[in-house]
Amino acid sequence: MNEKFENICRVKNNSATDLNLIPVYTYSEFSDLALNLLTKKENHCVNYFASPYKNGLRFIASIADDTAGDIILLSHFLASSEPKQLNSLTPKITALHIFEREIFENYGIAFKDHPWLKPVRFPHDRFDRNLKVNDYPFYKINSHELHEVGVGPVHAGIIEPGHFRFICNGENVLHLEIQLGWQHRGVEALILEKKQLLQRVILSESIAGDTAVGHSLAFAQLIESLGDIKISGQLMVERAIALELERIAIHVGDIAALCTDISYGLGANIFAILRTGIINYTQSWCGNRLGKGMIRPGGINLPFTNEHKKRLLEVLTKFEFQFVELAHRTYKLSSVQNRFDDIGTVNEDLIRSIGAVGMAARMANLNRDIRSSHPFAGYIQFPIEPVILPKGDVFSRFLLRRKEIKRSIAWIRNILANANFDTPSEKPVNEIVLKPDSFAISLTEGWRGEICHCALTDDTGNMIFYKIKDPSMHNWKALELSLRNLEISDFPINNKSYNLSYCGYDL
Amino acid sequence: MLDEIKIIIHNGKQFITDPKNVQLPEPFRGRPEISTVKVDENKLVELCPVSAISANPVRIDLGKCTFCGECAFRFPEKITFTTDYKLSTNIPEHLIVKEGENIPVEIDREAIRPEIKNIFKNSFKLRQVSAGGDNSAEFELNACGNANFDIGRYGIEFVASPRHADGILVTGPITENMAEAVEIAWKAVPEPKVFILCGTDAISGGIFAGSKAINREFLNRIKVDLYIPGNPPHPLNIENGLLDLIGR
Ligand code: SF4
């Protein structure tokens, strides 16, 4: 075992690696290594995918070591002449369940002993085209006492589609299963098909529109590492400011949404208005309320200037005063606490086992925050401490947002006090030549959590594979588990408390 | 109670008094204008990520445009984006902005079916269906209902069931996996009913046009009553489009 660890390939976030440097193990060596690594608390798998390569499939796993700030790369190969079957690692490391499911769905690889080998998103290029989105194999209980409740794909309200299937005993939910895929637009395939850099970055902005900055930043960083493009420290800081504004805006909107669901009108209305101030600021900077057009590879079209800095300080001061005043009132109301406290609890062990990331991890005592463990953009120069809460219930998710907003504001203020923007940052690059035969990985921390983009190039520098992971890939499972043994009427507040992405998951 | 009153006072008046006349700040990208200056039109056509630009004379199709602004960044003498947020229309040809003709995008009042004006003027309920939307148009549709934009004051509301609705508003390029659900939702709305495409993705597929994962066949069989361009459309654009449609 030890000698295997010695030639292990460790890379940093936002790096491009020569494919030949990624060790190719036999599947049994790969399994031993992966399981060994993933039983250590500091490690978690940020991506594990398969891609067509020569006459077979190449599987690459990226395991983040949060203590060392490294990403460990392992791979194995399955020739098309071999049987399409592998032993599942999920029985030992639950968090791998979703990656194995995805590989199963895309290439028909049967993972033996996988407890839940079901479709993920019914992509257009799936292995089994005969299986349709309406044929999802839901878990069933043959019982006269229990009943099922099915909701969706179209829900009540302005919201994306998904199907939720509850198995209930009276009002109590025993089991919730969430089926997604309705939003699948084929983003990964389109990123390869569309060759223009601008087309690709616009696609990345459209992975999840509420995380336009988070995803386009991962794309831009990935392309920059593949194209060996260095950007200025100032641009890195600007990007991180944009990302924090996205976090503040969506968090405060979610606080409003949670207030709506418990009929706390004052909070519902005023928190929503507070969001307007932040997204209007983003619009006054980049032209779009959701930050589309902000992030471009190599530069920025509308750089952050001292004028922007001055206005941002004004906006934040006004926002903070009103936010703090209202939050102070809202969070101590007994009617609010009563409704959120001890509801939908998932503990740290459970959250860790399913591989939850970002907010869904931090609200249950699990420290997962790429900004501090694998810093990128402005967080390299200006570190940020994650907010961690112990309990894992709806109230924790409600409170985490409040605390993260305060921390983000403090972090931005610190930068504005220390950095000046006298000379505008560099302009975007329109064409980038990519390194051949490389694997690149970029991690960012969007407001939901860890975003991971990976790409592979061939010997001419053509991009031949693109893999996107939204934090929702892991975190939908947390919502399912939160509902166990709750009343079905507690579903809305739990759903809002996570606010997971449908389109980010479906791609 | 006193605390609540203080909070309300500190927030002040928030609603937009007249959504028809708001000055949005630059660099908001609303209706583009195209000058008659000569530029390398091939280059201009080529740079557009969604083939929204055509040459001779230069035109931009707002139904395809993602409002990325790239054409204006690279050819500022040719293309400028105004802050005019009113981009919605019932006539596809009105979505085409032409060189030298810098006119507002308008609804053709005559072309609106009489039952829309007669029945929905004071109460207009829509069922929104997201079919591959990236949650940005959905985000702005939700914003229409908040205290700033307050579309509810005009009797416009998004309802939970198609059975309660006067029409369907679709966001997203219509994925293959949602195609059937869109049609079922449409059929569930009682007559007379209205069909609206909201956002560039919905109108043309946007950046997803040509994807093998989308299926827009349903649109060949239906008459569209309103196009609301944008990526995503600004709430004021949505609000004005809907108000114009019902004649308010
Ligand atoms: S702003 Fe519209 S027309 Fe101009 S390049 Fe972008 S998509 Fe094309």
Image (spheres, coloured by chain):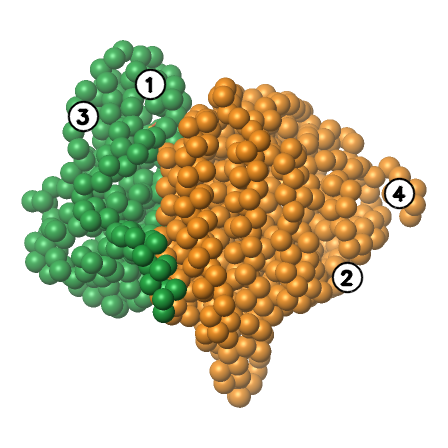
Label 4 sits on what residue type?
Lys
Q: Residues within 10 Å of mark 2 (few under 14, many from 20)?
A: some
Whether residue A415 can be seen here: yes
| Residue ranking furthest to the front | B2
Mark 2 or 1: the one toward you? 1
| Residue ranking furthest to the bottom | A145
| Mark 3 C-beta closer than 8 Å to ligand 1 | no
Element carrying mark 3: loop
Judging by the rendered image, the residue that carries numbered circle 1 is B76
Chain B pictured colour: green
Which of marks 1 and 3 precedes in the sequence?
Answer: 1
Label 3 sits on what residue type?
Asn
Cα separation, mark 2 vs mark 1, equals 58 Å
Q: Residues within 10 Å of mark 3 (few under 14, many from 20)?
A: few
Cα separation, mark 4 vs mark 3, equals 68 Å
Judging by the rendered image, the residue that carries numbered circle 3 is B102
Task: Estimate the x, y position of residue B117 in percent, counting from the top left.
Answer: 10, 54
Work out whether A345 lies above or below A204. below
Cα separation, mark 2 vs mark 4, equals 20 Å
Chain hosting mark 2: A
Label 1 sits on what residue type?
Pro
Judging by the rendered image, the residue that carries numbered circle 4 is A4
Q: Residues within 10 Å of mark 1 (few under 14, many from 20)?
A: some
- Quarter of the view holding residue B66: top left
Q: Residues within 10 Å of mark 4 (few under 14, many from 20)?
A: few
Report the front residue among B58 and A354.
Answer: A354
